[in-house]
Image (cartoon, rainbow, N blue to C red):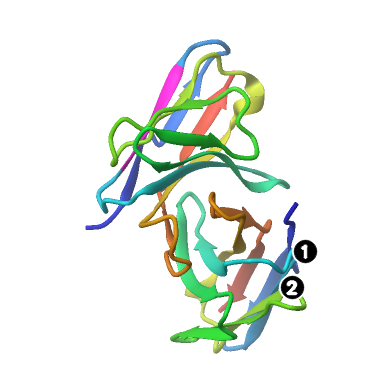
Amino acid sequence: KQEVTQIPAALSVPEGENLVLNCSFTDSAIYNLQWFRQDPGKGLTSLLLIQSSQREQTSGRLNASLDKSSGRSTLYIAASQPGDSATYLCAVVTGAGSYQLTFGKGTKLSVIP
Amino acid sequence: EAQVTQNPRYLITVTGKKLTVTCSQNMNHEYMSWYRQDPGLGLRQIYYSMNVEVTDKGDVPEGYKVSRKEKRNFPLILESPSPNQTSLYFCASRRGTVKTTDTQYFGPGTRLTVL
């Protein structure tokens, strides 16, 4: 059964710093990996999706990498801002047919002004 | 605006009183699913649907029912709610069931409390 782990569980950084969030998964037979952002009291917003054949994806100040063989992904946030404060969730799609998303428990990021 | 809507957003009920949480998407998506989110356990899938009249169990289906009579709607039914079903519920949809490039869109969540 696929398991997704995110480290650290919480992170606090001063504004302007670059930071890295980590995600690991136990079954490398994934179809894709997604990073989501969750704000308190709100739903999940998709940030980046990396297909299993890709190594990385970029959107603005965000860069996500995927090393499928080692079961790891990182989300790099450049020049962090207070508005980046949220919980970041990593999820992988495995399982032919259901394309079920398996989520990590998230990293709660606080960017201090 | 493309979106997934859920109603109600907040619900407090008592044990055993049947309830339905509605979910609707306006993107003509084939795939829809329900998740629950609990502290320390993360998001877990309850049920999913690949298309109209096609539904299947996720990881934690016990105590829940779903139906998919129309493509846009995917209600979650709790026939006899119990306190362990107190949770934050999310509905999600995705365009298709084959392409790995399809992202999932999530509703705003329904916070359910069962007393």
The reply to whether callout 2 and callout 1 are in contact (CB within 8 Å) is yes
Secondary structure at badge 1 equals loop
Which mark sits nearer the N-terminus, 2 or 1? 1
Between residue B100 and residue A14, name the one nearer to us.
Answer: B100
Amino acid type for the residue under numbered disc 1: Thr
Magenta stretch in the rendered image: B19-24
Predominant SS along the magenta part:
strand
Residue B102 sits in quarter: bottom left
Residue B37 sits in quarter: top right
* Residue A71 circle label: 2
| Quarter of the figure with the C terminus of chain A | bottom right
Q: Which residue is mark 1?
A: A26
In three-dimensional space, the C-alpha distance between marks 2 and 1, rounded to whole angstroms, equals 6 Å
Left or right placement of residue B82 versus residue B68 in this view: right
At x 56% / y 88%, what residue is drawn?
Answer: A78
Circle 1 Cα neighbour tier, 10 Å, few/some/many (<14 / 14–19 / ≥20)? some
Q: Is residue B104 magenta?
A: no
Secondary structure at badge 2 equals loop
Image height check: is A41 above or below A113? above
At x 73% / y 47%, what residue is drawn?
Answer: B40
